[in-house]
Image (tube, grey):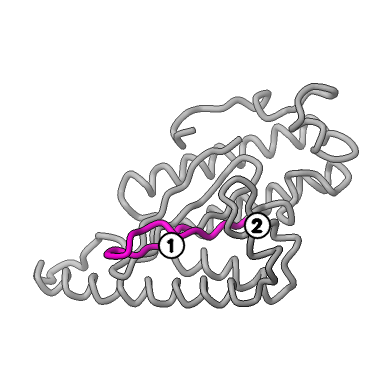
Amino acid sequence: MPLNESMSDDDRLPTAGGSDAAARLGPELPPRHESRRHGRVLRQVIGALAALAVIGSLAAIGPAAPAGATALGVAARTAVAAAALATRASARTAELEQRMDADRLARLRDADRGLPLGELDEEERALALGLFREVLSQDAWTQLETAMAADEELDLAAGGGTAWATSAYTITILDAGTAEDPARFVQLRGLELGVSAIIRADGVAVEAELVG
């Protein structure tokens, strides 16, 4: 779902005994006032990410140029910075994959399931989140942190162990290019918000979307 498509508080309130999604939301539903507060935070995050997407500032290396710089110089520096970012992101991706056993690696590379953050140890989780910290702009990362914190609070309000918990967020890493133009697709996906990046040799493209 596009980030600019509105969603009411009640859209995010599962009904008891309804869908499969409702059944996996834990031992009890959160209090309605907590759900409403969570909805307000999520709308703010969605609005901020949509605004960043419009101006091309989701990725760490954006198109903005410093005042007074020549267009050629800016383009050259941006290209070098973008390639360096892609190299760092690729290295983090490879390191994370190398730490996986066969079962976890298979799920990490499963586009439909992904690997829950809760199945990563502390270092692996830091590496996974560090990958997204690397590719996102500071503003985009701040919004993602805000959304994750709100999800954790809602999970606690519902008694813990729900699909809102950040431990239930999944990470996916896929090959997304060709032999001539190799690329990696990485995605961090929560219950309602996902952030994806395409990592190529010359840079990184980032997208945020509503999921579920």
> Mark 1 is on which residue type?
Arg
Queried whether the magenta region covers residue 158, the answer comes back as no
| Disc on res. 107 | 2
Left or right: residue 77 versus residue 22 is left
Do residues under tags 2 and 1 come within 8 Å of each other at their CB atoms? no
In this picture, residue 31 sits left or right of residue 47: right
Mark 1, secondary structure of its residue: strand
Count of marks, rendered view? 2
**124 w.r.t. 7: above or below:** below
Taking depth in this image into account, of 178 and 19 the one nearest to the observer is: 178
The residue lying at 71 percent from left, 54 percent from top is 166
Q: Name the residue under label 1.
A: 184
Residue 21 position by quadrant:
top right
Range covered by the magenta-colored residues: 171-185
Residue at 25%, 76% in the rendered image: 80
Q: What element carries label 2?
A: helix
Percent coordinates x, y for residue 167 in the rendering:
74, 56
Number of other residues with Cα within 10 Å of mark 1, as a class: few under 14, some 14 to 19, many 20 or more? some
Q: State the residue at coordinates (57%, 38%).
A: 211
| Quadrant containing the C terminus in the rendered view | top right
Q: Residue 19, labelled with which disc?
A: none
Mark 2 packing: few (<14 Cα in 10 Å), some, or many (20+)?
some
Where residue 41 sits: x, y (%)?
Answer: 61, 42
Between 2 and 137, the one nearer to me in the picture: 2
